[in-house]
């Protein structure tokens, strides 16, 4: 992850992480973020296994130090939860489509939709 975000790893490189979550919802095995050195006290008692921090921030958890905490954390979150690729569903069998309607190839028509005659 440190390589992915161009950060400096501080701690165990073999640490296994299972997810990425904001500090308020971080669970055991997660990596979280701390966007300000002034907020270090918020890490007390966190179950998070690691943290992304601004360069120069010293914390007790394994950490990745970066210039842009939010940008780096976004990349990390996308590793654990890649954006969904949406595929077109075509025409639902529950839609009513006139035989004379002109439908483009990349159109999606959902259930209970009604498409009338071509004009």
Image: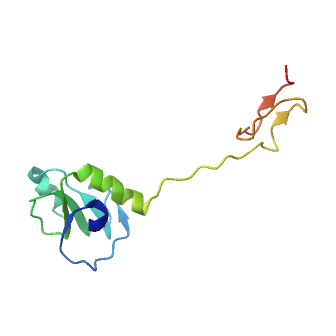
Q: State the image coordinates of residue 80 (x, y, percent, origin top left).
A: 41, 63
Q: Residue furthest bottom?
A: 14
Above or below: residue 12 compared with residue 43: below
Side (left or right) of 13 relative to 111: left
Residue 41 falls left or right of residue 23: left
42 left or right of 115 in image: left
Which quarter of the figure has residue 14? bottom left
Residue at 71%, 39% in the rendered image: 108
User: Could you tell me residue 2's position as x and y percent?
Assistant: 26, 66
Front-lying residue, 65 or 93: 65
Residue 74 or 34: which is nearer the viewer? 74
* For residue 17, side relative to residue 109 (left or right): left
Residue at 37% across, 65% down: 19
- Closer to the camera in the image, 95 or 1: 1
The image's colouring method is: rainbow
Q: Is residue 11 above or below residue 94?
A: below
Splitting the image into 4 quarters, where does residue 42 fall? bottom left
Q: Position of residue 24 (x, y in %)?
A: 28, 53
Where residue 36 appears, as percent x and y from the top left, is 14, 50
Can you say which quadrant of the picture contains the N terminus? bottom left
The residue that appears at 78% across and 43% down in the rendered structure is 92
Quadrant location of the C terminus in the rendered image: top right
């Amino acid at each position: 992850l440190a390589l992915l975000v161009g950060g400096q790893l501080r701690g165990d490189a073999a640490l296994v992480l299972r997810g990425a979550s904001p500090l308020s919802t971080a669970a055991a095995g997660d990596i979280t973020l701390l966007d300000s050195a002034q907020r270090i006290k918020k890490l007390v008692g966190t179950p998070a296994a690691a943290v992304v921090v601004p360069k120069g921030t010293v914390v007790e958890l394994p950490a990745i130090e970066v210039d842009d905490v939010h940008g780096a954390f976004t990349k990390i979150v996308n590793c654990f939860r890649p954006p969904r690729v949406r595929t077109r569903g075509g025409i639902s069998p529950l839609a009513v489509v006139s035989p004379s309607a002109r439908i483009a190839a990349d159109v999606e028509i959902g259930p209970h939709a009604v498409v009338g005659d071509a004009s």
